[in-house]
Image (cartoon, rainbow, N blue to C red):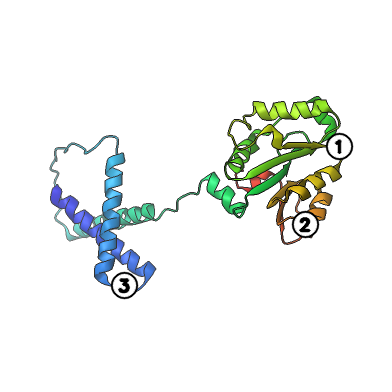
């Protein structure tokens, strides 16, 4: 039993070395063998440690008549070789399987390590898309919440919106608080800004000088294109002509690949 496992490991190391040679190029055979041996040993140790059942108990062997014809023997050897090749390839594929990046890594990469972000509320963070709707209620979009909280972990985030009355402001702040936006420590109520005109939002952004501004109003995006390093235009359809520093996405979460 131990000899079979040893032979199997040796074969896997050999096949792994051949794989590395083919992928990397002509390397010293001893170096390739060392790399292959280390990689396979690490993988086997990991698989053994995560196995819930541990080493399996040896099962009794039952002898069965084996035909002595050469055709059957050749067929068995072919199946055995195919099985070994398949197992070796499975180990190699599992070892080289790409690691999926975390949401935090995606956010940092997409924002090009920007440290300050300004973002409109209506239609981006909130379900509501009009000022009249905001007078009745404010609802944080559940699909955007995880992205929003991830941004606050490493960015100085400011949320802003035009409102028609003080009641709308209260509804927005309450909705953000109920969603847990203020509990992460990265965003405080003082960084949620309100104004009475669209020009007021433009003025906020100009004064804050963020690395990124996120907005659904194409006019504001166009006006700020000369002053802000990057912008994300939230729009159901991609505009035909946009400056090189303006990106477009149907939603904030789709921009980060969350949908």
Q: Nearer the viewer, residue 140 or 188?
A: 188
Q: In the rendered image of this protein, does residue 65 appear above or below residue 181?
A: below
Q: Badge 2: few (under 14), some or many (20 or more) residues near its Cα, within 10 Å?
A: some
Q: Which residue is mark 3?
A: 27
**In contact (CB < 8 Å): disc 2 and disc 3:** no
Query: Viewed as shown, does residue 150 lie left or right of 248?
Result: left
**In contact (CB < 8 Å): disc 1 and disc 3:** no
Identify the disc placed on residue 196.
1
Q: Which residue is mark 2?
A: 225
Q: Is the C terminus in the top left, top right, bottom left or bottom right quadrant?
A: top right
> In terms of secondary structure, where does tag 3 sit?
loop
Q: Nearer the viewer, residue 12 or 208?
A: 208
Q: Badge 1: few (under 14), some or many (20 or more) residues near its Cα, within 10 Å?
A: few
Q: Report x, y in % for residue 121.
A: 74, 38
Q: Nearer the viewer, residue 144 or 109?
A: 109
Which residue is depicted at the point 75% across and 53% down? 238
Upstream in sequence: badge 1 or badge 3 = 3
Query: Viewed as shown, does residue 125 lie left or right of 82?
Result: right
Comparing labels 1 and 3, the label whose residue is closer to the camera: 1
Q: Report x, y in % for residue 213.
A: 72, 49
Upstream in sequence: badge 2 or badge 3 = 3
> In terms of secondary structure, where does tag 1 sit?
loop
Which residue is depicted at the point 28% across and 55% down? 40
> In terms of secondary structure, where does tag 2 sit?
loop
């Amino acid at each position: 039993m131990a000899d079979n496992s040893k032979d199997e490991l040796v074969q896997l190391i050999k096949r792994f070395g051949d794989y590395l040679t083919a992928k990397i190029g002509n390397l010293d055979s001893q170096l390739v063998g060392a790399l292959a041996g280390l990689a396979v040993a690490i993988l086997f140790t990991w698989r053994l440690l995560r196995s819930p059942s541990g080493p399996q108990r040896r099962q009794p062997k039952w002898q069965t008549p084996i035909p002595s014809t050469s055709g059957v023997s050749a067929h068995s050897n072919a199946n055995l070789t195919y099985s070994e090749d398949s197992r070796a390839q499975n180990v190699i594929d599992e070892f080289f399987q790409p690691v999926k990046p975390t949401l935090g890594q995606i956010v940092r990469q997409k924002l090009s390590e920007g440290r300050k972000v300004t973002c409109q509320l209506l239609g981006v963070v909130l379900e509501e898309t009009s000022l009249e709707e905001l007078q009745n209620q404010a609802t944080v979009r559940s699909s955007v919440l995880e992205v929003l909280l991830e941004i606050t972990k490493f960015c100085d985030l400011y949320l802003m919106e035009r409102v028609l009355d003080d009641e709308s402001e209260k509804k927005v702040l309450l909705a953000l608080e109920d969603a847990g936006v203020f509990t992460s420590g990265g965003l405080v109520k003082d960084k949620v800004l309100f104004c009475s005109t669209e020009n007021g939002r433009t003025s906020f952004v100009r004064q804050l000088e963020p690395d990124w501004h996120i907005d659904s109003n194409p006019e504001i995006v166009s006006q700020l294109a000369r002053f802000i390093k990057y912008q994300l235009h939230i729009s159901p359809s991609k505009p035909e002509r946009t400056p090189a520093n303006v990106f477009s996405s149907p939603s904030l979460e789709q921009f980060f690949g969350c949908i």
